[in-house]
Image: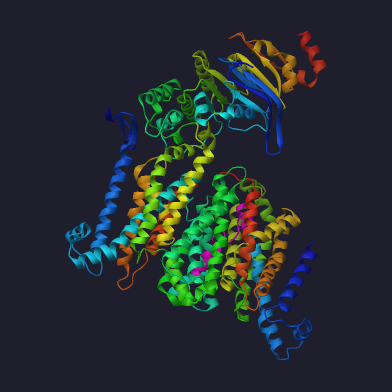
Amino acid sequence: MTGVVRSERPASARRLVVRRGPVALRLRVRTLVVGVVLTVAAIAIAMVSLASGDFPVPLGDVLRALAGQGDAGAEFIVVTLRLPRVLVALLVGAALAASGAVFQSLTRNPLGSPDFIGLTTGASTGALLVILILDERGLPVAVGAMVGCVATSVAVYLLAFQRGTNAFRLILMGIGVSALLESANSFLLVRARLSDALAAQVWLIGSVGGRSFTDVALVGIPLAVVLPVLLVLARQLSMLNLGDETAALNGVPVERSRVALALSAVVLAATATAAAGPVAFVALAAPHLATRLTRAPGPGILPAAAMGAVLMVAGDWLAQRVLPTRDVPVGVVTAALGGAYLTWLLAREWRRGRALG
Amino acid sequence: MLICALIALIAVATLSVAVGTRSIGLGTVWQVLWHDDGSVAADIVHRIRIPRTLLGIGVGSALGLAGALMQALTRNPLAEPGLLGVNLGASTAVVAAIAFFGVTSLSGYVWFAFAGAAMTAAVVFALGGAGRASTPERQVLAGISVTAVLGAFVWAVLVTKPEAFNRYRYWDVGSLADRDAGTLTRVAPFLVVGIVLALSLGRRLNALGLGDEAAAALGAHPHRIRALGVLAITLLCGAATAATGPIWFLGLAVPYVARLLTGPDHRWVLAYSVVLGPSVLLLADVVGRVVVAPSELQVGVVTAFVGAPIFLALCRRRRLGQL
Amino acid sequence: MDGRLWARELTLAYDERVVARDLSVRIADGSFTVIVGPNACGKSTLLKTLARVLKPRAGTVHLDGEPISSYASRHVARQIGMLPQSPVVPNGIVVEDLVSRGRFAHQRLLRQWSVADETVVVEAMRMTEVLDLADRFVEELSGGQRQRVWLAMVLAQETGILLLDEPTTFLDLAHQFEVLDLCADLHEQGRTIVAVLHDLNQACRYATELVVMRDGALVAQGPPAQVITPALVEQVFGMPCRVMDDPETGTPMVVPASRSRRREPLLGQFIDRTT
């Protein structure tokens, strides 16, 4: 029996109940709609991004090129030059947003984002070590970033572990480790040659320019694997939002679920940072914005991922248009937008007279 | 006890003058200290080490004091100018001054540093929740989020201006080196006013520590105390950061040690911070000079590598409340 | 020992502080057991240990004959439900959503909303009288309403044993008795109820069995009429009193001694005897 349960309920609570065979699911209509709309928007913006640039390609030609039936010129521009960049933007945005949604839920704090708990700083340190000491560019840098991110998460977790983890001892440890690594990063930059330091600095702001299909695979494959895992764990996550005690009383294996969720989020953040560098604020803002649209009681992973994809691909398109002569990295745009969003959030909480979270 | 701390300071200061990347015998140091005979050794001692030591004393007191003030005002033992983003606020303003307004002189961008420090302090205070809703952990988190915004902004600016980047990266690491004697004289007035203002707040901070309502009942004005405190923090952090670049964790560790030595009376904590701050900073600077001789490790790096573990250890010990 | 839930030789501790030693307690099946005692005597700690929220330093809790730690947490969640003292309310959640989360232990990945789930949730909300609040945001409710919503969530768990840690907190007098009446209804429907109450007279009215604790030790256990005597109340609570029959229900009613009697015990007794 499938049906939409209608009632005098507010729109946000209308549900779609699907009961067929062994499946019995109840989905929020609004969340579904928002998810679909955002995904369509992401794809649309991606198409626009593929069509525009120094050599504008008409939309029809873009589609033909993607299908493999375009002329050589269009195919080169669309598929070889622009497609990897756009794909990386979509996938990195989705991965960062999903990671952010999970962390914000786990830490029960809207500011508990991978940006702030040391993961991306660790990735930066790893990448810097590769760029400045090993003097490499390209894939080794990505590997360095991943290793740095994972090593930092392990370190932060071990530091925070004290007879079981406390949600935000983790954040505080992350902050401490992050500060330490920031200082290390500054130090590395001071010791380097100016040209190396400039190259490192470009990576550090976060960019999808010049990415190849290797980078697409780097973030795409983990995303394809981890996202279903997160969907399976989504119920545990919503129970953990009620507090460890309540979750345990309802049969949630608290420590195990948390580790699994955190590990998944770390993998997503690590691979995303490896592919595009530490792009600011997507992991923080995308879940927030998605929740405001869905009006659900917590960041849903799929809507957040879709929103992240939209933000990244729109940000990248914007970054390419902002300065007529130079290619601005997408990280600049996300930093500016993120800063604006944070200020707005602050002003709103000010007026409400209530503290964040 | 305070006398001991003072003696320690003098000892460390002497160390700072005597030790360096170029080794000069103690006898020679003593000689040229009183007779500037124009030799290389005298040059080093008078033109480099003494100004550097004096700058270290000034900045060390300022940061130690600012940290103690911040912890008292926010009732948060984890507060310190670096963590709460105030240092970075000052830096960001300086970057903006260098990149957008073409300001290159210290006395010029010191004002920017103040503005940056003040605005950041206000923002972090509001974001972390004021009054009843604020908890130490929330404030630190707010500070880090503000740091992230500002950091991103700084990088964004520097991406487009490589010349500014080159100048900035040396400044960003927090160093006492490569600052001429003029630096100290230019920021000294602000430091002095800030220090005097901070020390004068001691007794009123004790009252504030009992809670806003209790303090008001005792006749202290919580808002006025906070305003004066923020003014002092702004002067101290702004001047210090303008002179040396951002130095982390000093403001965290120094008041902690001061409290260990003297208990919670703020008058004494502030007094000890003024003396301990420079000792710690100069010690870190000396370590930096010695550890990787003949090159140098900037003092900001040393304080971070030593200070961060202290911060982490502090966090593990504390009974953590909810975020 | 018989019965579904019992504990043997428990040592309970928080960090370094030992709260109870060698504590053994048996919860009679189908009873309405109320644990009473002065502050910090370990009643909440005991309840949480029985619910498997806390691990005892020593000793074991047994459920259905096996140590409770040997079961999967989902299984325990289907047998024992507990109303926690200070639960976390996520932002923006409506009442019906929150109550539905109590069905977690009965659900699987693909079976998230069966007909049974829906029926139980509606029934739980009806019993706690929050059905008309179903679409309200939980954070907008009053303390009393919120308490009933949490109770509904625990009821949705559909457990045979219900543990309640001070369920009357935040409630005004009428609502306190409403909640206790609801517990009595649930008890009559066959559930085993174990509650911690701080009001001794309420405990006497509703309990079929009292567990009296002091300083982490079991002082007495049994029906209120047998257990509650002036000597016991004075020993455990340090309060001289009289025990009479509650005029409404006939259960024991503790009447604390007057001020004069407490200050001058001998003189007070003299005055009382002559009036």
Query: How many numbered discs, if any?
Result: 0
Residue A286: where, in percent of width, then height?
A: 39, 51
Residue C29: where, in percent of width, then height?
A: 57, 15
Q: Residue at x 31, y 66 (%)?
A: A320
Q: Is residue C189 visible?
A: yes
Q: Is residue A240 left or right of residue A180?
A: left
Q: Quadrant of residue C248?
A: top right
Q: Nearer the viewer, residue B321 or C260?
A: B321
Query: How was this image coloured?
Result: rainbow
Q: Residue furthest bottom?
A: B38
Q: Quadrant of the N terminus of chain B?
A: bottom right
Residue C58 part of the magenta-drawn span: no
Vertically, is A339 above or below B186?
above
Q: Nearer the viewer, residue A341 or B265?
A: A341
Residue B288: where, in percent of width, then height?
A: 65, 72
Q: Quadrant of residue A65?
A: bottom left
Q: Is residue B220 visible?
A: no
Residue B130: where, in percent of width, then height?
A: 54, 50
Q: Residue at x 54, y 51 (%)?
A: A171
Q: Is residue A288 left or right of residue B139?
A: left
Q: Nearer the viewer, residue C210 or B71?
A: C210
Instruction: Please report the bounds of the magenta region as a residue range.
Output: B68-93
Residue B91 part of the magenta-drawn span: yes
